[in-house]
Amino acid sequence: MRIFLIKAFFIFFLSAIIIRLFYWQVIKAEYLQSQAEKQYFRDVEIEAVRGSILFSDGSVLASSNPSFDLYGLPKEIDPDQKIKVSYTLAKILLEKPEDIDALAGELVNKLEQDLYWVPLKKKISIDQKKEIEKLNIEGIGFNQASSRFYPEGSSSAHLLGFVNSDGKGNFGLEGAYDGELRGIAGTVRSEKDAMGLPIMIGNFFTNEARDGKDLVLNIDRTAQFIVENSLKKGMEKFGAKSGSVIVMDPKTGGILALVAYPAYDQLKYFDYPKEFYRDPVVADQYEPGSTFKVLVMSAALNEDAVSPDTKCDACSGPVSLGGFVIRTWNNKYQPGITMKEVIIHSDNTGMVFMAKKLGLDKFYSYIQSFGFGGPADIDLQDESSPEIRPKVEWREIDMATASFGQGIAVTPIQMVRAVSAIANGGNLMEPHIVAKIKDENGRVFEIKPKVIRKVIKDTTAAEVKEMMVAAVEEGEAKYLKLAGFKIAGKTGTAQIPVAGHYDKDKTIASFVGFAPADNPKFVMLVRYDEPSSSIFGAETAAPTFFEIARQLLLYYKIAPTE
Amino acid sequence: MTIIKKFETVEPNKGFGKKYITVAGAFLFILMLAQVWASNNVITYGEKLERLSVLSRSLNLENQLLEQEIAKNESLVNIASQSAKLGFSEPESIQYIR
């Protein structure tokens, strides 16, 4: 019996050992292997550098800048010193000395936590890092990071968008091309010795990092600078709530300049309301007003519904339609006005006459053909496209008001793209900010110009062009025209709808045009929201347009032809 | 009288094989020593590699900072500001010569 008990005792403990061994060597094998690998393998992440965004001439618009994340080791800092350390760091980290108490308080709270490691401040500059390092503060360290750098300042904020603290691009080009710009991090896995140094004859596994691709834009650095300065001056001079300018190459659809104010600082995007992030050029909808007339005129001429010399027999006074009365902007009427003069004098009654000649079916079809009611497909994030009501819902008054650009909503990019079709002989182009994408190996992917469709005939485009030239030379903006240059353009003053009616004191003042008219180098739309100095496009948007045009013609070395 | 020669068997030349085995053995031994010596030398190169990696990272960082400095200095914002300080201004009239 005793022998049996002893045997059972040994068998029991032998089984227990076997089971335990099975547990550690089979069930927990992978876990133990990974723990062992952590001890003798070292993994180093190779950060991928975010791609740069370059102007058309290769100069930098946005690039990655090495920066540092500051961290603290609370348990290594003497509790009595934490407040002093926080104030010392705050003095170095702050730009404005008046905020020092707030930041120092924040740092003290972090350092007083019962943790081994706390992040203190992200993305500090190398100069700040060197200043802190000189102080040799115990329990403070740095991790290398990267942040975005904008050598031209933050006035291209809407064009670029921003990169958040997780390295993700939002809005603008940073958002639209985040996948291409971001890159893929790599790793180096090597066997390490007791000191943590790599063992050369040990195992070495490398997964190379792939840096983000660079974007080369169609944006011209000088054109962008000219537009930014002129628009900024115009905003101050005319007291507008907001403003935007877009300049496009009509032959390729390449965007040469794109600016909107108010802008924001991409590095401090979190200090601004979210409404600021959206680019009004692609995301804001507005009623285009009289600038839309050139498109309706193109449609009517293309369909031979009218000719430039057709006389309006219903333009001797206000037009009554469906219980509404349509007047001219200055309440002056010219009986027998020709279609050309309708554009020169921006006559609403003449437009109503023309729209009736065209008919709703064709009118609606040309609105769609010019690209309204759908996105322009520009390569920027957050483009919106206002819907055009279905044709069956249109009443006669709707077509009448739409003929002079009221009661219909468009975005600035849609408007400038449509007018480009007049400038280039009738082709609707797909607009593009980016011209090329370059990878780290030097391979280049070109984004070629794309013709979406032919909207109007060459002859129609030529006729409308002459009308627009006449509008500049003889219309409301004639005092602003540039001597010796043939410029095509049209003013627009659209009332803003507020709670079901139009506010007569608030307008969107705009001017759209292209130059030189015979071989256009650029098409431009200038838009001011609620200018306070004057409600009219001829007195606000037009001067800005001609100021920018003057500088662009000089920059492109285009001599006067007249 | 018949003389019978004593037939002696020819013994194989054992010295010849032994020599080659000894040489091969010595050669292998020298190779082993060489491998040990090379490994011992290379095994400490980890520290050198680490120093070179740190130097490489530091130089890359310096390059990036210099590129940033160049981009800042050649930006139009900076050029416009510097040229204004130097007294440059916008042209008042342009002459076109044909």
Image (tube, coloured by chain):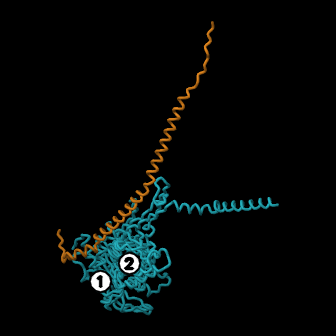
Where does the image place residue A155, in percent across and percent down from the top left?
A: 34, 77
Nearest the viewer among B36 and A56 is B36
Q: Which residue is mark 1?
A: A234
Q: Secondary structure at mark 1?
A: helix
Q: Which residue is mark 2?
A: A89
Residue type at the position of mark 2: Leu
Nearest the viewer among A450 and A296 is A450
User: From this viewpoint, is residue A272 visible?
Assistant: no
Where does the image place residue A66, in percent across and percent down from the top left?
A: 38, 69
Residue type at the position of mark 1: Gly
The chain letter under disc 2 is A
Find residue A541 and name its label: none
Tally the numbered discs: 2
Q: Which chain is cyan?
A: A
Of the two numbered discs 1 and 2 on the same chain, state the one appearing first in sequence: 2
Front tag of 1 and 2: 2
| Picture residue at 61% right of the left edge, 10% below the top | B3
Position of residue A394 relative to residue A519, above or below, is: below
Q: Secondary structure at mark 2?
A: helix
Q: Quadrant of residue A562?
A: bottom left
